[in-house]
Structures are given as C-alpha cells and as structure tokens.
Amino acid sequence: MVRSTVAPATGVPLPSAAVEELRRLLRAALTVDAGAAPAAARDPHVPAAELLAAARRHRVEIALAPHAATLGCADAEVEALARASRAQRVAAMRLVAQVHQVQAALEAAGVPALFIKGPVLAAQTTGDPLARGGGDVDVWVAPNSVARAQEALIPLGLQPRAAYPVPTEPAAWRLMIATMYETPLIAPAWAVDLHWHLDYNRAGLPSFEEAWQRRIEVDLLGRTVSTLGLADALDHSCRHAAKDGHAWLRSLLDVHRLDLLTRGTRTTRTTRRPVTRRTVEVARALLAPEPEPASGPSRAPSRAVRRAVRHHERDWPRRYPLGVGELVHLAQRLAGAGSLGDVVRDLALIALPPRALGGVRTRSLPLAVAWALWLRLRRVGRGVSPER
C-alpha cells in the first residue's frame, strides 16, 4: 500500500500493440508452464522498448523471463527481462524475511494471523514463493485483535501511518474498524498492511473466523505460514483485481492460476458471486490459451473485458483533480458492493476516510464524527485532500 515497485506515472499511455503483444506472450508462457509447446512467438514489429515498458508497468517480467528465449525474444530483451526478474526475486526474498518477522511477533503475542497476497499467493499458485516479486507484507487478523497485533509489531520498528487513528483514540479507532479494512504500519525500509477484513466491501467474503477454519499452510523458504484456502484466495484475488478495473496483468495472472487450481471444485458459494464471475471471465478472455476457431460467429468481448483492455494501456497510478479521485474510488467501491452495509460503509469512507479521524481523542462516537467532519471540511477548504 505504501511502497511500490511500479515506475512513476508519466501520463503517456502504452501503445496498444505492445500491450496486446505482452498479453499474447503471457498466454504463450502459461502454455509452456502447463507443459505444452508455445502457441505464439515474439512479433518483431513491436519495438523492444515498448514491450519492456509494458511488462514493467504490469509487473510481469518475472513471469516472462524464464520463457523469453523460447518465445523468440531478442537477446537484449532476454537479458533485460532476466535482470528485472533477478531484482524482483531479491525483493521477494526480503519480503519473505519480513513475513517471518511479522509471523514471529504475532505468534509471541498469541494473535492468530493469515498472510495474504505476496509470497504466500506466489507459493499457492506457482509453487515458488519468489514468483510475484516484492511489495508490502499483508497480514489479516480478527477485528478484535487489531490493537493487540499493532502493539506486537511496533517493536519491529513499524509505526502507524501519520494521522491514522490509534487505540488510544477510542471513538475514532472504533469508527475506522467499522468502516475500513486495513491500516498501514510503516518502517524506514518496509511496510505492513494490517487487515481485519479482506476488502472495503464485505458481503460474500468470509469473516476471519471462517477463513481461519479453511486455512491452508504453505512453505516460505523453510517456514510454514498460514494463508487463505484456494477458494477464498480466488474470491479475494478477484476483488483485488477488480478494484482498478482489472488494470494489472499481474493480478489477472493470479486469478487465472487460481481459476485453474479451483476449477471443478468450486461451490455455489463461490461461483454465484458477480465480482468473482466477472473477474474470472476477464482473466480467461485475456490470458487463457487461444481457443480453437469456432465454426459460428465469435462471441463479442464483454464490457468488463473491453474496459480491462483500455485500462491496460493507461499509465498508472492515475492522477485526478481534487475531489474527482474520491468520486472515482467511490464508484469503484459501489460497483463491488453486495449489501446495504457495503453501500453505507463506502459512503462513510468518502466523508470520513481513516486519515481524517486521527487525533480525535474523544470517547463519544457522535462527537468524534462531528469533530472529524469539521477538520475535514477545513482541510478541503484549504485545498488539501486527505489521503485514502
């Protein structure tokens, strides 16, 4: 959430041909992973610089690098992808060490925890915990354990992000726990996203207790770590990929791999969720091996697939004028809402994001809301937009 391996946004969109070539090569790489001959070779008409820029933007060099030569990439491209892959794997090794630190601290404090995304997801989907590169540590605890977990992690040098509520601000803390799903803890060289739910929108996703009962164990370079069961990981990865309109091919790779692992074993509980169905459809349409030519007319891509293709060409993260970003994020959250409670939380987060609640020390919830709204209005009046 805080640190990213993505290059800073330049405002220049990626060429359509380069992004389509990247998707085509990823489909071919997935075919090789499955033990078949590649169904595509590198198109020499797409400039190397454009292809590498697209791979960097979508964080997929590490997926392409092992197969670059087989797919017909030029020697310079093979070397560039190999260098990027090595750097990402080194970052992933640091991330695994950080996961081990967090795990040890929470175990010592008696806080059950599930690690999500990052190396545990890589281990689940590829058997290699280094296959997704670096990032932040994402850990999920029960809502009533968040304060205890945060206290256990502070000795690691991690501190709550400035202006976010802390447990000594009781009303603001309760409001954040009720409306949000994670809080960032920051150290000079790394960060932890401490979750108490999996997403802004909670309908259709398991509670911590349900996910804990269905958890599985994965090996992270010699240590066993608890994470989501495969069906829960698919649901969560679909929500994560859908947040930005399926704008990241790395996230769609996660969904595609989990789709393959869970196919034939899903329950109605999973398959009836619109966000899961829609995201799996997008991942299949864009990353599954090319289907055999149909005898009849081909089916037109869905709206979600067309939108994902457009988003893949845009520079990211997108920049918005003051106020516009909040409305865009609200629309994205409301699109994934599955209950009235989700809608209420989504609206509450626009009025009072976590950063607007920090420093409100009263125990009275109505007074905390009134005071936070006043402070937020003052900031907006000065042209300052609180961070999400």
Image (cartoon, rainbow, N blue to C red):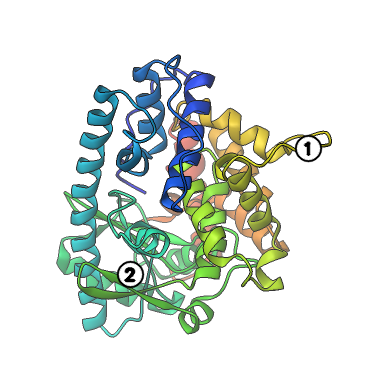
Q: Note whether 242 is above or below 276 in the view shown.
A: above
Q: Note whether 323 is above or below 147 in the view shown.
A: above
Q: In this orientation, which residue lies closer to the viewer: 210 or 47?
A: 47
For the point 67% across and 50% down, the residue is 278
Residue 385: x, y in percent?
45, 36
For the point 27% across and 30% down, the residue is 78
Query: Which amino acid type is marked by label 1?
Result: Arg
For the point 35% across and 70% down, the residue is 167
Residue 276: x, y in percent?
64, 57
Residue 322 in view: no
Query: Which amino acid type is marked by label 2?
Result: Thr
Q: Secondary structure at mark 2?
A: loop
Q: Note whether 354 is above or below 329 in the view shown.
A: below
Mark 2 surroundings: few (<14), some (14-19) or many (≥20) residues within 10 A: some
Name the mark on residue 255. none
Q: Nearer the viewer, mark 1 or mark 2?
A: 1
Which residue carries the number 1 mark? 299
Which residue carries the number 2 mark? 168
Residue 226: x, y in percent?
36, 75
